[in-house]
Structure formats: C-alpha cells, structure tokens
Image: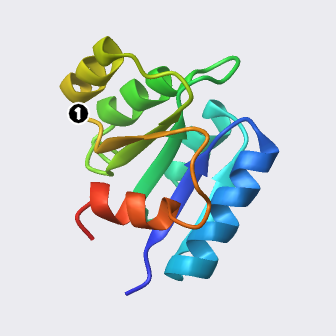
C-alpha cells in the first residue's frame, strides 16, 4: 500500500535524502516543503498519511507548525514525526505530551529511516 508523506524541513539536503530514501526503500509518495509556512499550505492540498517535520526552522519552527496542524480539524489527525538534532530527556517528555507520533534524531541513517518511520507509525 502506497503511503503519502509530506517532509517539511528548511535544509534542501535533508529533504532530498529523506524523499529519495522513503521512495526507493519503502515505495512511498513523498512531497517536500522548504519552510513551515510552505508546509502548512501544502498540507491542506492533499491527503497525507504522515508528516515528517523538522523542529528547528527559521520563521516558523516545527513546534509552531505542529500547533497549527493540531488547531485545524482537517489536519489534526495526521500523524507527525519530528526530525531534530537536539533531543534532551525533557524534550522527549514535551514531545510525547504534545502528541507527536515520534521523534527521529538527526543525523539519521538514510537506509533505515523508512523503517524508523514505519515503526513509529505502526505501519
């Protein structure tokens, strides 16, 4: 079954690597957005099975994007996996309380990221 994912990250290299990895190894359809604002616009135009969301972005950071997704009845139920380089135990607790589906730590392994996503989302 083909999944449809949106990757929101301000770093082009990360978007490219994640997109290629999820397409090649899992066969999922992946679209990308280079900013939180672009991500919020794209999320309303499609049917998404999950969103991979960078925490640290200029302008609109991942946590602000997540809050806006949660506030919108149309996007509230889309599972969100956070991508972040910095995760302290307090961050993990906060993310869990927020209701994100999971966290993937950067740098991640491009060969296994699809597996991490599938595990976090119980696919």
- Residue at the location (51% across, 40% down)? 53
Outermost residue on the bottom side: it is 1
State the colouring used for the structure image. rainbow
Outermost residue on the left side: it is 97
Image check: 74 left or right of 14? left
Image check: 10 left or right of 31? right
Measured from the top left, where is residue 123 in percent x and y?
A: 27, 71
Count of marks overlaid on the render = 1
Residue of label 1: 99
Between 2 and 113, the one lying in front of the other is 113
On the image, which quarter does residue 96 sit in? top left
Between 70 and 28, the one lying in front of the other is 28
State whether residue 49 appears in this view. no
Does dot 1 land on a helix, a strand or a loop?
A: loop
Measured from the top left, where is residue 14 in percent x and y?
A: 71, 47
On the image, which quarter does residue 1 sit in? bottom left
Outermost residue on the right side: it is 12
Image check: 91 left or right of 63? left
Q: Is residue 17 above or below residue 28?
A: above
State whether residue 81 appears in this view. yes
- Residue at the location (80% across, 45% down)? 12
On the image, which quarter does residue 21 sit in? bottom right
- Residue at the location (29% across, 54% down)? 120
Q: Is residue 12 above or below residue 50?
A: above
Measured from the top left, where is residue 16 in percent x and y?
A: 75, 57
Measured from the top left, where is residue 63 in percent x and y?
A: 45, 23
Label 1, residues with CA under 10 Å away: few <14, some 14-19, many ≥20: few
- Residue at the location (40% across, 59% down)? 117
């Amino acid at each position: 079954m083909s999944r449809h994912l949106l990757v929101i990250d301000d770093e082009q290299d990360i978007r490219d690597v994640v997109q290629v990895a999820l397409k090649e190894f899992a066969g999922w359809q992946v679209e990308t957005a280079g900013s939180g604002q672009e991500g919020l616009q794209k999320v309303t135009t499609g049917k998404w099975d999950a969103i991979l969301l960078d925490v640290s972005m200029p302008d609109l950071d991942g946590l602000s994007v997540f809050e806006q997704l949660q506030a919108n009845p149309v996007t509230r139920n889309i599972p969100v996996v956070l991508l972040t380089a910095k995760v302290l135990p307090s961050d993990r607790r906060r993310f869990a309380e927020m209701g994100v589906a999971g966290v993937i730590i950067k740098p991640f392994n491009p060969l296994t990221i699809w597996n991490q996503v599938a595990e976090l989302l119980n696919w």
